[in-house]
Each structure stands twice: as C-alpha cells, then as structure tokens.
Image: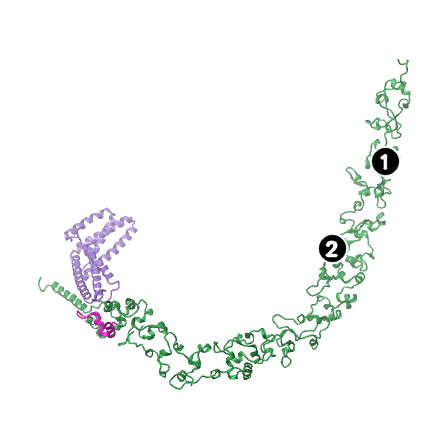
Chain colours: A purple, B green
Amino acid sequence: MTTHVVTGVLALLLALVHAGMAPRATVGGHALAALALLVVTGAIGRYFYAFVPRAANGRELALEEVQARLAQLSSGWDRENRKFGERVRARVHELVVAGHWRGSFLKRVSGLLRSQRDLRQALAELASAGLAEGVPADQIRETLELAKRAHRATLAAAHFEDLRALMGTWRYLHRWVALYMVLIVVLHIVAALRYANFGALAP
Amino acid sequence: MRISHPKLWLGLLSLAVVVAIVLYESEETSPGPLTRVHASVPELVERGSCERCHGDGEVTLAQACSDCHEAIGQQLADRKGFHGALDAQKAQACGACHGEHHGDALAPVDARVFALAGVADRAAFRHEFVDWRLVGVHERLECSKCHRNADVAVLANGASRFLGLEQRCASCHEDPHKGQFEERCDSCHGQDSKFTDLANFVHTDELPLRGAHASITCAECHPKGSDRSVEAVGGRGPKQVARTCQDCHESPHTPAFVVAAAAQLGLAARASCVDCHSIERKGFAVPKEDFRRELHAATGFRIDRPHEQVKCEACHTSYGSDVPFPRRYPGRKQDDCAACHTDPHAGQFADERGAQPACVACHALEGFAPHRFDVAKHAATAFPLEGRHVESRCEDCHVREGEAPRQFAGTKSRCESCHADVHGASFYATVAGGQRDCESCHDPASFDAEHGFDALAHSKRTGFELAGAHERAQCEACHIRGETADGEGRRFGRVAELFGKPADACATCHADVHAGDFDVKGLPLSVEGRQTCERCHTVESFSDRKHGFDHGQWTWFELVGAHARAECDTCHKETPRKPVVAGGRQLVAQRKLGLVADAITPKNAPACAVCHKDVHGGQFDRSGQPVTVEGRAGCARCHSQESFAVGARESYDHTRWTSFALEDRHATAACEACHVPTNAAAKGLPKLGRSAGTRCADCHSDPHAGQFNARACEDCHRSAESFATLVFDHSRDSRYALDSNHVKLACSACHKPWPIAGGREAVRYKPLGTTCVECHGFEKGKND
C-alpha cells in the first residue's frame, strides 16, 4: 500500500472526527463528501489497477512479457490429472475467447466485471464435475487455482490495451475529484478564518 | 497538443465544472442553520448577510448584535441590568453564551446560556443581581409568572423575554379595590404573606382582631358589595361605628335560654354572649371546661345523675362539628330518654298503636339499672311471680338470643319454655298427647315433686313398675342424688345415665353376684317364661328362692348323700367379691353364698378336693398307686358321697395301698392298734393316724432293750402267729454253741432278767460269757 493510499484513508477518518461525526449541508460538509468520494474512486481504481499486468516492482509489463508468463503457466497443467486439467484449460480458453470488449469506458468496465462473473460460474461447475468424476478434492483445488491464474494472465494478454485504457480513464476522473475537494476545503478554511472566533472572547 | 485535440477540450470542460461548483459553494459559507428566531428575520437569511451579525473589520460582533437588541445594548452601555452586570469582556462576546448556526438544536436563551453567564440554576437566580430584590411570595414564583415570555421558544417580533417590566405592584397585579383606596398597596399588603393576609394592616381600636376574629378573612365580616365591605368601611366614604355580637352573628339559642342564662349572669340579654363565647378564644364553640352546669339547666335539662359524668359528645354527637346548631343542641327533655338512648327493648313494650311507655315507668331517672320493675309490677303481667319464681333473676326467664334484645314481651309462661326438662323427656313422652304436665308432679312455687310421684306414678311415667323390694326401697337407692347439682340444676339421677344401661333390666342396678355363672352356654335362658335373674329370683327378695334351685341343673353337680343333707353355706361360704361400682355408687358387692369354685364348668368334672381337704396328705396319690378303682377316681376310689367313713374301711385293701399285707395277728388287729387315733379328729382330720412305719420296731417296743439293735426282729421272730415262736439256732446265731447239756436247759436258765437303765429289767442275752465260771461261778477247791 502506498503513501498515497494511506494518506487518503487517514484524511477521511480525521475529517469525520473534525465534523463531529455529524456533517451538515455546509461548505465543510461538502468538503467532507468530496473527500469521501475521492476515497471511493480511489478504491475502485485499485480494483482496476490489479488487472493491469505488472512486474514485481510495479512496472507495467509489455505484451511480450505477459505472453511469456502465460507460457510458463501452461507447463503446470501436465502435473495434474490430465483429463480434468485439459477440460479446465479448454474452459478457461473458451471464457477468454468468448469475451468481446468494446471500446468505450463503460463497456470495458462491463466486460471486465462480466469476465470475472463468468469465471466464478465456470470454476464452480468444473469443481462439481471433478468431484462427480472422482477427482481428489485437493487436486481439484490446485487445478482451479492454476485456472484462475491462467485466466488472469490470458485476460491480460488478450485485453492488454483495454485494461490500460480502462485504468487511464479512471485515473482521469479521480484527479478531477481530487481537484474539487482541494478547492472546496480551501473555501471552508477561508470562511472559518473570516467569521469564527474559535471560542476566544472578542478583543 | 493540437487545439482541436479532444483531451484538451475535455480537460477544459472538467475544469470549468469544478470551478463553477466551487464558486457556487463560496456563496453558501454558513456553518449551519440559524435559530428559528433569527431565521424568521429575512435580512439575516439572505445570501451574503453574514456581516449583519458578525460585523466587518470595523464593527464587532457585540456592536452588530446591539443594532437589533437595543435594550441589551443599552444595558451594556449603562452597565445596568443582567448584561450590564456581567463581566465586561464576557458581555462583549455575545456568541460565547448565545450559540448560533445549530438551528433549533441550540436555543438562544435557555438554562445552558444562564449557566454560561454564571447562573447555574435559573430558578435560584438572585434577582437583586438586577436591582430588584424578590421577597416573600415573589421569591417562590416561577420566572414566567412575571416574565411571560421567559420560556417561549420563539419570541414574537419586538417582544422581550425578560426586559420591560416595572417595579410597581399594579404593573403586574390587578387592583381589587378599583382605586378606592388612597393608601399605597404596601400600607396593608406585604410581599411576605398572601395578598389577603394584610400583613401591614392594623384593625381599628374599636374591634381589635383577637382570638377567633384574628383568623377569619376580611370578607367574612366585610362581604363585597355590602355596606360593611372593606371599601365601605375603609375607603373614602364615611366610617361605620362599632357593633354588638348580634350585628354579625346570628344567635342559635332560644330566647328562653338566652333570658335564663342572662338572668343567671346578671347581664342584659344582648350582652350576655361574651360570658360563654370569649372573643379571646378561637372559634365560636364553647369549650367544655368553660361551660357551667348551671347554664345547661337553663336549657331545661339539668346535669345531675347519671349525666353528671357523661361527656358532652355522648349526648351531643355532633359536638365540635359544623352541623347546624339545632342539630347539635336539639334541646331535649329531661325525661325523654329515648331522645338519646336507644331502646334496648327494641319496642317490646309498645302498645297496639305503637306508643311507647316512658322509660321512667320502669327505670329511675338517675340510672337505667337497677330497674324499678318489682314483683308487684310483675303481678300486673300475665305471669305473676310466686314461690321460687320471686327469687329468680329477671334474666333467668327473660333471655337474650345472640345480639337480639332481651325478650320481655311474649315470654312464654309454660314450664318448659324456661326450664330444661331434666328428666330428658322421659316423663313427658309418656303423657298422652305429648303435653308436658310438670305441675302434675311439681309444685309450681317450690318445684317440690315428691308429693305427687308415688309408685303408681313411677309405673305410669317410667314404665318400670315398683313392686316388692323395689317399692320398699328408697328412691336414692336407684336414683342416686348427687352432692352437687348438674348443669340443669338436677341432683336426682336418672337410672340410665347413672348406670349406662336401660332401666328395664335387673343388671342395670344390680351387679351380677354370680359373675355370669348362670349365663354360660348350656344353661337355660328361660325358666317357665322367666328370664335372666327372674329365672330364680323375684322382686320380693333376692334371697327368696321361691322358684327353687335345681343344683344339678344349674351347676352340673347333683347333690346326693351327705351333699344333699348339707347346708348350702357348708360349701358356698360367704365370700367377699370385688366391688362393682356404677353411677358413682357401690352396687351389691358381696353375696351370701360364695362360689364353690370359679373353675367349675361342664368340662371340668366336680372334684372333692374343691371343698374337702385331703386328710391323707396326698398319701394315696403318690406315684405307683392306682388312679382309678373300678372306674372311680380320686376320693371315690375309697369313699362315697353318702359318708366319708362308712364303707371305706371295710373295702380298704391294705396291701394295695400300703404294700404292707395284713397277715396273722396283723389281720385281726384293730386299725387303731397301728394307726393310733390322734386328736386331729377334733380338727376335722381323720380319726386314724398314720402308722409309725412298716418295721416291727415302728409299732412294737423292743423287749430286749436294744441288745439286738443291729439285727432285724424277724431274724428270730419270723412267725406272725406268736412273738414267742423263735427261729434261732444258738450254735449258729450266737457265739456259744449249746452242748448236749445246755441244750436241754430252758432259755431262762442262762438268760435271766437283768437291771437296765431307768430302773427296769430286761432279760439279758448279750453279752454273756462263754466260760463256765461266768455262769456257774467259782467254787473254792473245786475249781482250783
């Protein structure tokens, strides 16, 4: 977790205390709402951020690097039950191929969420089928974990540009919310300095 | 980046939106909603109106507030009033106490605000802090009583919460006198008491308010609107003069009482009130200790016996209450007892029209008890008192049933209405028709009954005919008189109660002296129709056995022989029996003829030994002797009932019973020769004594004076024919064999009589010498 995230979350908590846990519809209250909105957009952005393939140091990977990682994962399939593993592998491939993302921001969001939903359903069906065929439970669990990683790697390779574009758009929104929050906080501080005596008696 | 690049326009558009929103927000910098009172002022709620309250750089917050709250601003300027008395620095910081921008959640003036101003409790606010000291009733008033808007949440425009009041009474209080008095309010009224208490008012000297007058309200004497109202007597009009008691008080007393009382006091009637009703005393009522008995007589009712110790409240039950005077003191007559006292007789003496006789007709005026209704007055009733009734107490006949009054009227005059039937309905049931006729036996005056209760009456009323010994007996023999009377006053006992049995059986009074011997199974229950005791006895006499007594039938012991000739008491001795006590007395405890043996029953055959003593001392009942002889047992083995002696000796087998056969001389010898008669016969014992034994020496004396003591007689005298016939071989049986010379000699030639002890003589047989010289002697020369 970066300093960016930590200061954002702490700022919201401190602002709530400053508002006495009872914000009102005033400039100060609006500043608190803007800060809360900023934290929320940040949290969603962190979700999208997780799908962009990165190196251990956070650097975004190039497509070639993603494809190499995917190939490395393929070797793992042979260690498990071959027949069950082949079927899982085919199903993951089918999921990635079947997803058609569009070019707009909302459609990319929709495509990402839908692919995750389809993956959960497919893994649940494969787990039930594996148990019915007598595949040991620990072997099913390992195979499905491998399938998750393979799906994410395959998704990153297949929608490499879509994911980067999605992240870029979301970052744009987050920055404008941050600007609004800063301005209105400044306004709140100026008004307080102007009219309030902060409890001190008048001179 | 080109000017036409979408990202540029999109960025500018976004910036514009953000700036627009911030600018809009900059016009709404209020930190919260205003209180309702401030929010109701349009100038304070419009945009950009912050400076109206907060001022600007040159106008302070206090100055801005004072622009609207001028009165408070004046207080601050004059250093007066609540705000003027505050600390100067605190007084300038309006917002320090009166919070804003919290809407209705924070009232501009409430307890919190007072607390911030140093008044922890508004109700305890010291009003002199604002130069107006509250005392008395004012001190206890709620703030809102004077400051109408003290608790109003939102003041009307222009209204004041605490300010604006004056310190004149009339500014708050309405003048009840409508301005008719010239004096100031506080010349009569004070703050320390109620308005009607007139704390500062002093009544006129003509009628100083003391005693009862001190506690009444003005309006009680000075009713509003009357010519005696407060305004009429104390206002600007002419003053009234002093008056007498009757001018204000209405007298409840009768004129006769007032005149009589005044005459006793020597006062005029109008001025006599004060003798009893002192003005110094609170209340019009006269204390009991102040009311003289003589005055009570003036009412027509003297206080003497028995009322002299009675408390007032006993007669005047409403004494001290607020009920009207005529009800408290109704003026009763001296002899009208019923006016106060409840008729304890519950109207029993009322006549047909319901009129009651005067109580004093029977009771003295001085007291209810003792009454004065004597025998002479009782004679006027339907039941004149005579005899022992004169001695009776009233309550003996006139009883009370529970809580009901004692009954006088309608008291029944029949004996049984007052007297319990001590005879337990025994006599009453036998009289025809069930009517009790006590007087047929008892004297109404003395209750003496014996004059009319003879044997005939006894038979008639009790069903028990008195005849024979019963007729001759005293009444108490059966009806035992107790020493003390029972609960019914009766001492003459009933047979059934005394003995616990029906009176129609002999056994009720008489103990069965035979102890049930004649009521055992097997004996007749009836003899010629007679039962129980009457099978043998009659009522004439117990000992008169008129019907005879079959001893064999009743006792299974037929009397024959000597038994038939014997007197009864020969066998049936007079025997003390265990006393039988019944009904507190001892019944016949002894009978003349005792039982032969209590153990005689058909199963236990009669035995001679029951009556007769065994004179043989059991000699014939020893082991080995026959139990029966020809079927006869016991004494009958030898004796018959005809006679003890006759036949017994003749049939006596001496050998069988004694093992000593009587032979030769013994067979012919008289019994008395061996069985020497003793003087025991005089004591009822047999004439023949017991023999000394079966040895010869037991009966016969020893002629040899004990010389053969070690040998038995029959060793020599074997023949029973004669004592002199010997079976003795001198050569064998003695130490001296007889030679031919001596054998010829007579025994006496050698055995000669020899003196023995006691001066008697006996033929000497031993010891004798065996040498010649011991018999023949020594002859000189011949024997040498």
Question: Which residue position holds label 2?
Answer: B580
Q: Residue furthest bottom?
A: B238
Quarter of the image where the N terminus of chain B is located: bottom left
Where is residue B70? Give x, y as percent.
24, 75
B381 with respect to B227 (left or right):
right
Disc 1: which chain?
B
Amino acid type of the residue that numbered disc 1 sits on in the rendered structure? Cys
Residue bounds of the magenta highlight: B55-79
Is residue A45 visible to the viewer in this orientation of the structure? Answer: yes
In front of the other: B27 or B784: B784
Where is residue A135? Give x, y as percent.
28, 49
Question: Which residue position holds label 1?
Answer: B674
Estimate the spatial distance between the alpha carbons at disc 2 and disc 1, rounded to whole Å: 54 Å
Where is residue B292? Give x, y as percent.
55, 77
Disc 2: which chain?
B
Q: Is residue B445 magenta?
A: no
Q: Residue furthest left?
A: B2
Where is residue B767? Give x, y as percent.
84, 23
Q: Is residue B68 magenta?
A: yes
Task: Return the mark for residue B464.
Answer: none
